[in-house]
Image: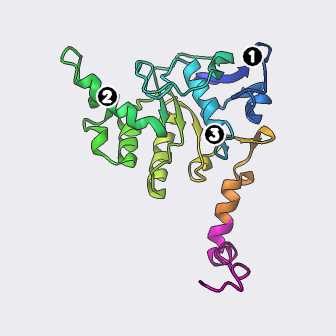
């Protein structure tokens, strides 16, 4: 563990699980989980939708005291109870206490923005919460702009940040901007755990990448990921790839067109 590592490993308390046939324990990634070690700077969870990467990230966040729908540990709102009970079966090894922290869920960031406005509408509240997010309502910005405002203004360093698909609604150039900001925060003793589909983000040097699949969880190098290989193959010869993908020569032959 390094000085900046706030979470070093996650262990599934397998002896407490009654059955591995019920969700979320039936997910291959969870069913085969024992101990998952985390990088002191940046760990990526990757895999297809439904593979369990977001489920595990959410469970880690909740077990650490974050709100299930996102935000800081001070957020206690809930619009819909949708998270699983997996957090109750995790043992998270903690190191130093982080001075800052945030759990971002792309799918419920709208709810976080609404809660900020609700808090600021309280006449008995303290200073406006939105001041920590750039001073402009997150609802008045695009999804990409609001996330950039979050990571630029709210993330203060020396923190633990869990991000679920932060690339949602971000252009490639803005993903690069986020990658640069992540590096700034890592240099300021921060630790990240990120679930993503972005080959741009997961290119961060020395990060650990865990792939969630039907075979469970395994650690890969960046070049071994499907994200890197598919993107590289497409960009190296897009015409060839498109010819294969869009070929309909053998389909619909002999149809009358009526």
Whether residue 124 appears in magenta in the rendering, the answer is no
Quadrant in which residue 134 is drawn? top left
**Residue 90 visible, this angle:** no
Q: Nearer the viewer, mark 3 or mark 2?
A: 2
According to the picture, the residue beneath numbered tag 3 turns out to be: 44
Q: Which mark identifies residue 116?
A: 2
Query: Which residue shows up at 32% across the image and 34% down it?
Result: 133
| In this view, 65 is above or below 256 | above
- Residue 229 position, x and y percent, is 70, 59
Residue range (magenta): 233-258
> In front here: 6 or 30?
30
Residue 3 appears at what percent x and percent y? 59, 22
Q: Is residue 146 above or below residue 64?
A: below
- The answer to which image quadrant residue 78 occupies is top left
Q: Which residue is mark 1?
A: 13
Q: Quadrant of the N terminus?
A: top right
Residue 148 is left or right of residue 158, and the answer is left
Could you tell me residue 185's position as x and y percent? 48, 35
Please determine whether, in this image, residue 245 is positioned above or below residue 149: below
SS assignment at label 3:
strand
How packed is label 3: few (under 14 Cα within 10 Å), some, or many (20 or more)? many
């Amino acid at each position: 563990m390094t000085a900046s590592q706030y979470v070093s490993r996650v262990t599934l308390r397998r002896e407490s699980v009654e059955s591995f046939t019920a969700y979320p324990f039936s997910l291959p990634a969870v069913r085969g989980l024992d101990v998952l070690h985390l990088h002191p700077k940046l760990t990526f969870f990757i895999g297809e939708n439904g593979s369990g990467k977001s489920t595990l990230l959410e469970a880690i966040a909740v077990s650490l005291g974050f709100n299930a729908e996102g935000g800081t540990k001070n957020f206690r709102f809930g619009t819909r109870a949708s998270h699983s009970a997996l957090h109750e079966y995790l043992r998270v090894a903690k190191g130093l206490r982080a001075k800052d922290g945030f759990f971002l869920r792309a799918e419920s960031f709208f709810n976080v923005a609404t809660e900020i406005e609700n808090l600021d509408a309280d006449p008995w509240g303290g200073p406006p919460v939105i001041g920590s997010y750039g001073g402009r309502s997150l609802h008045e910005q695009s999804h990409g702009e609001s996330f950039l405002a979050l990571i630029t203004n709210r993330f203060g360093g020396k923190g633990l940040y869990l991000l679920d698909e932060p690339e949602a609604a971000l252009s490639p150039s803005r993903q690069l901007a986020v990658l640069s900001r992540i590096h700034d925060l890592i240099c300021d003793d921060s630790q990240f755990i990120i679930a993503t589909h972005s080959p741009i983000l997961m290119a961060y040097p020395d990060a650990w990448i865990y792939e969630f699949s039907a075979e469970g969880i395994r650690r890969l190098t960046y070049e071994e990921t499907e994200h890197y290989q598919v993107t590289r193959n497409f960009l190296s010869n897009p015409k060839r790839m498109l010819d294969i993908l869009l070929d309909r020569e053998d389909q619909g032959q002999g149809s009358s067109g009526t």
